[in-house]
């Protein structure tokens, strides 16, 4: 064996470099990219500047306002409503629903919005500023409010961003981080707030901060990193881009203004008369650069010798302006999580199927924000506060408090993209058992119990007014059963004098007659015979196996038999048939009748004759030698 080769240090180093991520390198491509390794709270240094710029974009830029408005509309709509799913339907459940609906109108501590309007304002403040605080404001029992509690929205500036390990009024062992007081376990126990908004020009010094217990405050923001204490505006990642886009847009606008300054200059050679105006033959009067002649449509002007006309060449509008702006706002819409078509209203070259896919993806993101942020951080805590206040006021008992607080929240339903295909698809899901009617109704933002009650009320009203239309045709306009129409006489026969027996009963009579004839033949010939197969007009009748019709009474008299040589003549029996009409149709199981007659070296043929009504007239049986 040879000596082991020593590894090449240069090759080993290249191998180590090649096994790393390109983004982790520090070579020529990445040497200028040195982001800081800040923690989740250190990274939001300068949070107030982000808030100010985000609000400025929303105030003065259509893209910022569009992004905020579209999110508020899709997350809240007309409101996210609660449903009492744990309580049975009845008067008590309706009382609690009415109690909540009355409180909704007075929920705002500022006296401006109702509870569902506060939901929309919470989302707007959260997206603009990155966060918003909600404070419970308890009221006195003698305040005149049925449920003595209201909700106050507080902007992010009320909680200053500062850190402190010691502070006047701070319990020992607790600390303040980003204006939030944490205990030794890192749990939020209080919020330190200004008495008034610091941006209103009032004196709001740090020495006048109030300590508000965390049980009375809810902090609404979107957590992007574990351990993140404060929220950042949703527009933070595109603020710099939007600033550059606005600067470019302003430059193009100014260029278009210059392009409208169209001017014509007339130049004069040295040989011309400088004292006489060649256009008017009048002495020249200079008044500070006024044009020599106005431009008119279709004018043809002759110039003197030595004169020339020069037109100004103003800048043109950029031919790639629209494409550039569209590309930039595609990035803006992607950063805000809104489809470009909804963000800008531009649906050029977009098919309905593509738009459906885009909208469905956006709605999944919207539902995530509803159930991860809006409902658990705002709606459900407020419902719990309301239940506690109702219990203290004696309007809700302790036994039902938990069921009243734990409601099912129903966001405002999405509109159908296709008003025909979408409902048809949901109906097929219900009919196939893939989902329930209640889930379809709840998806629309409605309460299944309320919808069913409304349908029942509508049905009763239609019946009382004679407007009901039964799709099966079995009920009339008043909801009463419809009597079946009488069947007319179409065969020309008096039904009272003659009632034709059912086919099954007639065949049964023929089978009984054949058995009697077989028995007579066996007695005459002294032979043991088997049942003969009954043939009627070259057709083997079926045998009745199961009949749900009441069996009629049939009396068949013994036939008269005469023997003339090898021929047996059987007289037609008198059949007395009494049929009891039945409402249920008979059920037949068709099977050939096993009737067979064997005689040594003989062949028997049976012929049966019937009249026009199907009555048996004559039955003849002839026995011949077999060939």
Image (tube, rainbow, N blue to C red):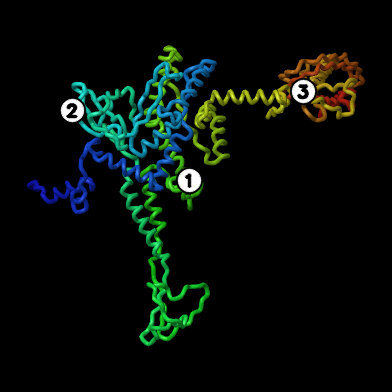
* Residue 404 position within the rendered picture, expressed as x and y whole percent measured from the top left: 44, 18
Q: Taking 371 as reference, is 472 left or right?
A: right
Marks 1 and 2 sit apart, C-alpha to C-alpha, by: 53 Å
Query: Element at badge 3?
Result: loop
Residues 514 and 125: in front is 125
Residues 327 and 81: in front is 81
Q: Which residue is mark 1?
A: 355
Marks 2 and 3 sit apart, C-alpha to C-alpha, by: 88 Å
Q: Quadrant of residue 143?
A: top left
Q: Which residue is mark 3?
A: 483
Q: Is 605 drawn above or below residue 4 in the view shown?
A: above
Marks 3 and 1 sit apart, C-alpha to C-alpha, by: 53 Å
Point 40% across, 75% down: residue:
265
* Residue 320 position within the rendered picture, expressed as x and y whole percent measured from the top left: 39, 60
* Residue 604 position within the rendered picture, expressed as x and y whole percent measured from the top left: 83, 25
- Of badges 1 and 2, the one in the foreground is 2
Point 34% across, 54% down: residue:
247
Query: Element at badge 1?
Result: helix
**Quadrant occupied by the C terminus:** top right
């Amino acid at each position: 064996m040879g000596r082991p080769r020593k590894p090449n240090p240069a090759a080993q180093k290249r191998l180590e470099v090649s096994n790393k991520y390109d983004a982790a390198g520090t070579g020529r491509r990445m040497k200028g990219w040195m982001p800081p390794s800040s923690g989740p709270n250190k990274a939001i240094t300068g949070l107030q500047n982000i808030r100010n710029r985000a609000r400025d974009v929303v105030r003065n830029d259509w893209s910022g306002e569009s992004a905020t408005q579209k999110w508020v509309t899709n997350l809240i709509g007309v409101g996210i409503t609660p449903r009492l799913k744990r309580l049975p339907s009845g008067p008590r459940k309706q009382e609690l629903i009415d109690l909540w609906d009355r409180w909704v109108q007075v929920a705002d501590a500022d006296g401006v919005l109702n509870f569902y309007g506060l939901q929309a304002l919470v989302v707007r403040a959260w997206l603009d500023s990155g966060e918003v605080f909600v404070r419970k404001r308890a009221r006195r029992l003698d305040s005149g409010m049925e449920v003595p509690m209201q909700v106050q929205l507080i902007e992010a500036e009320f909680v200053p961003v500062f850190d402190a390990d010691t502070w006047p009024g701070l319990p020992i062992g607790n600390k303040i981080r980003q204006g939030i007081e944490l205990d030794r376990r890192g749990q939020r126990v209080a919020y330190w707030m200004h008495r008034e908004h610091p941006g209103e020009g009032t004196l709001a010094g740090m020495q006048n901060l109030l300590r508000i217990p965390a049980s009375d405050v809810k902090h609404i923001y979107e957590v992007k990193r574990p351990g993140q204490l404060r929220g950042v505006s949703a527009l933070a990642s595109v603020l710099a881009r939007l600033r550059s886009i606005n600067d470019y847009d302003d430059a193009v606008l100014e260029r278009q203004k210059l392009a409208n300054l169209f001017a014509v200059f007339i130049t004069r050679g040295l040989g011309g008369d400088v004292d006489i105006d060649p256009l008017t033959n009048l002495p020249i009067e200079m008044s500070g650069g006024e044009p020599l002649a106005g431009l008119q449509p279709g004018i043809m002007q002759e110039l003197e010798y030595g004169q020339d006309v020069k037109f100004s060449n103003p800048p043109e509008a950029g031919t790639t302006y629209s494409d550039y702006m569209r590309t930039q706002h595609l990035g803006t819409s992607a950063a805000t999580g809104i489809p470009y078509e909804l963000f800008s209203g531009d649906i050029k070259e977009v098919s309905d199927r593509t738009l459906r896919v885009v909208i469905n993806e956006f709605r999944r993101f919207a539902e995530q924000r509803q159930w991860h942020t809006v409902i658990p951080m705002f709606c459900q805590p407020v419902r719990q506060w309301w239940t506690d206040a109702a219990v203290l006021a004696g309007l809700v008992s302790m036994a039902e408090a938990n069921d009243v607080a734990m409601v099912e929240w129903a966001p405002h339903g999405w509109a159908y993209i296709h008003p025909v295909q979408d409902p048809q698809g949901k109906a097929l899901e219900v009919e196939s058992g893939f989902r329930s009617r209640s889930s379809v109704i709840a998806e629309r933002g409605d309460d299944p119990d309320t919808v069913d009650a409304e349908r029942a009320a509508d049905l009763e009203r239609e019946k009382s007014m004679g407007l009901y239309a039964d799709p099966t045709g079995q009920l009339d306009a008043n909801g009463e059963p419809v009597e079946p129409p009488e069947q007319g006489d179409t065969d020309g026969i008096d039904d009272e004098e003659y009632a034709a027996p059912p086919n099954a009963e007639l065949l049964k009579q023929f089978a009984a007659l054949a058995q009697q004839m077989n028995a007579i033949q066996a007695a005459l010939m002294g032979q043991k015979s088997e049942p003969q197969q009954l043939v009627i007009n070259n057709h083997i009748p079926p045998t009745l196996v199961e009949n749900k019709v009441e069996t009629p009474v049939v009396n068949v008299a013994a036939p008269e038999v005469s023997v003339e040589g090898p021929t047996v003549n059987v007289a037609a029996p008198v059949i007395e048939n009494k049929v009891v009409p039945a409402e249920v149709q008979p059920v037949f199981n068709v099977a050939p009748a096993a009737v067979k007659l064997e005689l040594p070296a003989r062949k028997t043929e049976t012929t049966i004759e019937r009249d026009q009504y199907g009555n048996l007239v004559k039955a003849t049986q002839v026995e011949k030698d077999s060939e």
